[in-house]
Image: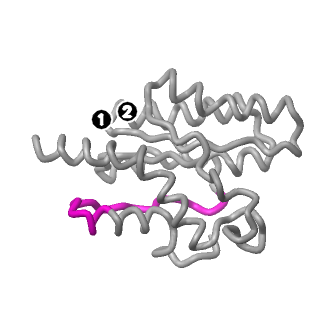
Amino acid sequence: MGLPADAAFPAVLGRQWREAGLAVEVINAGVSGDTTAGGVRRVAWLLAQGLDVLVVELGANDMFRGVAAAEVDTNLRTIVTRARAAGVAVVLLGMRGNPTLGPEYQEAFDAVYPRLAAELEVPLVPFLLEGIAGDPALNQADGIHPTAEGHQRIATTLAPTLGPVVKAALAAKAGR
């Protein structure tokens, strides 16, 4: 949102991995404004692309629309289980509830990601926007979407969790 595709964190990670000698193709299948329900509708199409790793980064738009945390949980669970059933490794990127939505909603929303990661045994980055959310220097004028520098920081945040998953997928693919 608001940036050229090559400045978004998927492109940044792809460049970093290729520069490190990893033969990867990173596809940014994100859709601006998408919700977890939209992700459920698109997961079959994504899996048909022959993915090795699926990074699930959905839920913020649900939160801003006040979608019940239970529905967010169900939708994310559906995406993760379908991907895993197809033999695709999954990494879940967490979000945090906005305090302006009330403490009950925030608490319920904040619990979704760690619960799913534990129950479904998938790696979790607890908060995608760690160190970025709320920093005007790292966000666009809307105060929500990261700048190019913010996306660089996201890539740095994701690398320790996502890198080993990608390397394991590459190794498994080479062994086939």
Q: Residue furthest bottom?
A: 4
The colour scheme used here is: one colour
The image position of residue 72, as x and y in percent, is: 66, 36
User: What residue appears at the point 70 percent right and 34 percent down from the top-left corner?
Assistant: 110
The type of residue carrying mark 2 is Arg
What quarter of the picture does the N terminus occupy?
bottom right
**Circle 2 Cα neighbour tier, 10 Å, few/some/many (<14 / 14–19 / ≥20):** some
- Quick check: is 31 in the magenta stretch? yes
Determine which residue is flagged by label 2: 84
User: What residue appears at the point 72 percent right and 32 percent down from the top-left corner?
Assistant: 69
- Residue 30's place in the image compared with 74, above or below, is below
The image position of residue 101, as x and y in percent, is: 87, 42
The reply to whether discs 1 and 2 touch (Cβ–Cβ < 8 Å) is yes
Residue 121, disc = none
The image position of residue 113, as x and y in percent, is: 60, 33
Nearer to the camera, 122 or 41: 122
Q: How many callouts does the rendering have? A: 2
Determine which residue is flagged by label 1: 87
- Residue 147's place in the image compared with 160, above or below, is below
- Alpha-carbon distance for marks 1 and 2? 5 Å
**Circle 1 Cα neighbour tier, 10 Å, few/some/many (<14 / 14–19 / ≥20):** some
Query: Magenta residues, as a range?
Result: 17-33
Nearer to the camera, 173 or 135: 135
- Quick check: is 10 in the magenta stretch? no
Magenta-drawn stretch, dominant element (helix, strand or loop): loop
Q: Residue furthest left?
A: 175
Residue at disc 1, secondary structure:
loop
